[in-house]
Amino acid sequence: MIPKSYTQQIKSAWDSGLDYEVLRAAAVFFVVCIAGTCACAFVPAVQTGAEHVLELLFGDSAISLEGVGNMQMNPFGIFLNNYISCGMIMLYGLIPVVMLPALQLGINAAVIGMLGVLTVRSGYSPAVYLLSLLPHGILELPALVLSAGTGFFVCSRFTARIRKKPEGAGIRQCLQLMGEIQVKILLPVLILASLIESFITPALVGALV
């Protein structure tokens, strides 16, 4: 049984508005993902730009799944990249007023939508693309949304503190909450996601392409 103190701060934040911010982050992610998909699908200039950007970021593997079943992936590297990214998106919440976590959340959502279009237009079925994303994405995407929602929550509470409102929270409280979420939720979730992405996802996709 998990001691009450183990999750007490997270539960308190959840009941105080973190649940709403996570829901808002999920809505932002969904809307931007759909917008990125539609823009890439129906605006040729967006598709061309997306191809160039994704190739710069990921190389040819951004739009090619050939040989993915034989790829040697580093689970620690994948975990560390995702873990740092989730930590950073929460830390952006310490910049008051501007809700900067929405920017990184939106970029990730747009990339996922655009990459889907480019993958399908490269000759793969939508099912193959979904299979390349969902086995680990079932864990990674909620972790990203939770991180962004925490960033929204921290931003609103830190901004309230600056404006001397009663619901405000200081940097120490905000960092403590983010640390609790980072260690107690994101750490195990992203370790499992990195193992799935390294060993299970490539095998499933490799069997279909």
Image (cartoon, grey):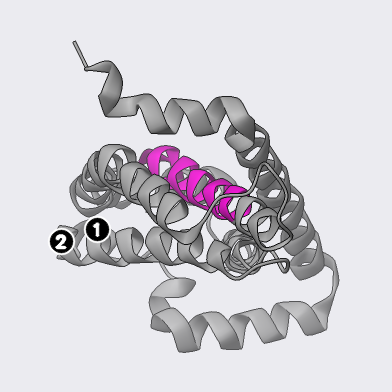
Kind of element beneath mark 2:
helix
Residue 61 is situated, as x and y percent measured from the top left of the image, at 39, 74
Tag 1: residue type? Answer: Phe
Position of residue 204 relative to residue 9, above or below, is below
- Write down the region rendered in magenta: 134-154
Q: Is residue 80 left or right of residue 116?
A: left
**84 part of magenta stretch:** no
Q: How many labels, in total?
A: 2
Q: Quadrant of residue 113?
A: bottom right
- Residues under numbered marks 2 and 1 in contact, where contact means CB atoms less than 8 Å apart: yes
Along the line of sight, the residue nearer the viewer: 36 or 24: 24
Residue 57 is situated, as x and y percent measured from the top left of the image, at 45, 83
Q: Give the numbered dot on residue 79.
A: 1
Residue lying farthest right? 43
Q: Which residue is labeled 2 in the image?
A: 76
Q: Looking at the rendering, in which quadrant would you find the N terminus?
A: top left
Q: Quadrant of residue 111?
A: bottom right
- Residue appearing at x 31%, y 59% in the figure: 83
Q: Give the numbered dot on residue 98.
A: none
Give the main secondary structure, helix, strand or loop, of the magenta stretch: helix
- Residue at mark 2 to residue at mark 1: CA–CA distance: 5 Å
Residue 85 is situated, as x and y percent measured from the top left of the image, at 40, 65
- Residue appearing at x 66%, y 36% in the figure: 23
